[in-house]
Amino acid sequence: MTVQVSVITTSSLGDRSYLATDGRVAVVVDPQRDIDRVLYLAGAAGVRITHVVETHLHNDYVSGGLDLARLTGARYLVAAADEVGFARVPVDDGDVVEVSEALRLRAVATPGHTFHHLSYLVDEATEGGWTTTGVFTGGSLLFGTTGRTDLLGAEHAHELAKRQHTSARRLADLLPDGAQVWPTHGFGSFCSASQADAPDSTIGREKQVNPVFRLAATEFVTETLAGLDAYPAYYAHMGVANTAGPAPVDLTPVARADAARLRERIAAGEWVVDLRHRKAYAVSHLAGTVSLGLDGPMSTWLGWLIDWGTPVTLLAETPEQVADAQRELVRIGIDRPAAQATGDPRQWVDEPAELRELPLADFPALAAAQAGNAPAGLPAPQVVLDVRLGNEWRDGHVEDAVHVPLPELPRRLAEIPAGTVWVHCGSGYRAALAASLLANAGRDVVLVNDRFDHAEAAGVRLDRSA
C-alpha cells in the first residue's frame, strides 16, 4: 500500500503532529505530550510505532516524544547537534532512516526556526524505486509562511532568517512540485511568522504563494523581522524542559476545593480560572477569579500571564471540562492544577455577596456611547482599552483608545486612566480575561464582547494613521 499520513491536530496551540504508516509500522513526527491520542490512532490503524521523530527542540510545547518512545520501544530521533539530557538516536543532514521496506525518511538540515532544525523527506517504495511523496517541515516551510526566527533570542533573528530563506529553497530544489508539505506550526502557533493561508499545501503551491520564494533573501529577512510580534512568556520554559527530557504526564483528577478553600486561594494571590464561556462568566462568577474559557486558547494565555509556578485552580461546569483543561495545561508544562471545582457559581460561595457580574456590550453600543448615548444600564466609557497585540493595533484601532497589550496588563494596571473602562480585543476572548483582571483590581469595567472587524460598520470611529 502507499504511505498514509494522518494528522493529529492541537488547535488550541496551533500545531500539528503526524503519524505516517505503510500499513504495518509507523513513524510519529513532533508528538504533543498527551500521547494517548497517538497511541489510539496507531491502535485503530493496527500499526506498530517504530520511530518517533523531532524536527527540532520545540519552544511552544512540551514534547511527548521521549515518553512515546519509552512506551512503544520506538527509536527516538533527535538532531545530533542538539545537546540533550537523555538517550536518543542522533540524526544529521543526509541521514537515511529505513523505517521498512516500503517507507523511509531522509533528513535534511533546514536551519532557520532553530539552528539545528531538520526536515524529513518521505519516500515510499514503488515498482520503479523510491518516490518522494512529501516532507515533514516542522517550523521551516509552512503553509504560505515560515517559522519565526527570534525564539532563540533577538540577537539571532537576523542570521536565522537568512538561513530560513536558504533552507526553504533547498527543500524546493530537492522535492517535486507535487510533494506534500506537512508542517508542525502555522495554525495559530506563535512559532509561525504569520498564520497558515490554506489547510494543506504542496511544494508547487508554496513556490507560487510563499514570500520565502517570492522575495530575495534581503527582502525576506526585512519583511520577516518587521512582522514579528510578541510571543508567550512560557516559551522560555519549553526548550529547557524538552532539552532535559520531559516526564510522563499525570491526567488523573485533582483534589476538589470547597468555597472556603477557593477564597483562601484567591486571597493568596493564586490563579483561580473560570473555564466557562465568557457570557456565562459575565452573568455570574466568583469574585477574584479570571475568565479563560475553554472555547479559546486558554493554556496559551494562562501560561503567558501567570508567574511561572503559581498554583492554578480550575472552575468548570463539568468534570469533563476540567479534564480537558488539564490536558491543555500539561502540553505547556503546567502538570498538576492545585485544585478544581465544578457545577454552578452558587456552589463555589458561602455568601451571595461573593458573586459578581460583568456588564457586556458590543461595538454598536460603543458607537452609541461615543456619541453620548450609552445604552441603558451601561455606564459611559471614560476609557476605551485595547488589549490586542502591537501588529493588530497598528492595523487600526478605536480613536483615542488606550493600548496595553494583554501580556503587559498585569504589571501595567496602575497605568490605566481613571474612570469606567470599556475593554475590547479582536473577538472578546482576550478582553474577558482583561476585564476580569481589571475588576479584580477594583476597576469599573465593561466587556466589549464583539469582533473588532465589526467596529467600523457599527459606527465606531477608527484611527488608521499607523
Image (cartoon, helix red, strand yellow):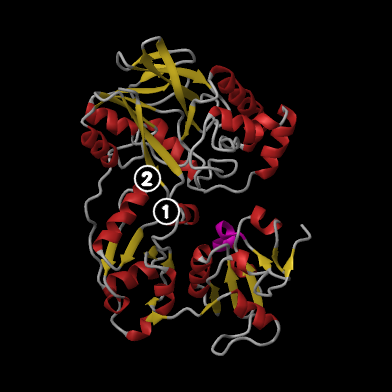
Name the N-terminal-most of marks 2 and 1: 1
Task: Please name the predominant secondary structure of the magenta segment in the image.
Answer: helix
Place of residue 246 in the rendered image (x, y in percent of width and height, measured from the top left): 34, 36
Q: Which residue is mark 2?
A: 331
Q: Which residues are magenta?
A: 405-411
**Is 444 situated left or right of 318 in this image?**
right
Q: Are marks 2 and 1 in contact (CB under 8 Å)?
A: yes
Q: Check if residue 408 falls in the magenta segment.
A: yes
Separation (CA) of disc 2 from disc 1: 8 Å
Left or right: residue 91 compared with residue 388: left
Q: Give x and y (percent) for residue 96.
A: 41, 13
| Residue at numbered disc 1 | 299
Q: Nearer the viewer, residue 96 or 85?
A: 96
Q: Residue at x 52, y 31 (%)?
A: 202
Instruction: Residue at 70%, 33% (x, y): give it.
Output: 220
In the rendered image, which quarter is residue 370 located in? bottom right
Q: Which residue in the rendered view is the most extreme toward the front? A: 127
Crowd tier of the residue under label 1, counting other residues whose Cα lies within 10 Å: few below 14, some 14–19, many 20 or above: many
Q: Is residue 75 above or below residue 395?
A: above
Q: Secondary structure at mark 1?
A: helix
Q: Work out whether residue 396 or residue 180 is closer to the camera in this orientation and state it.
A: 180
Q: Quadrant of the C terminus?
A: bottom right
| Residue at figure coordinates x 60%, y 80% from the top left | 365
Asked whether residue 210 appears in the rendered view, the answer is no
The location of residue 161, given as percent across then percent down, is 64, 31
**Is 428 in front, or is 267?**
428
What kind of residue is marked 1? Answer: Ser
Camera sees residue 93: yes
**Crowding at label 2, few (<14), some or many (≥20) Cα neighbours within 10 Å?**
many
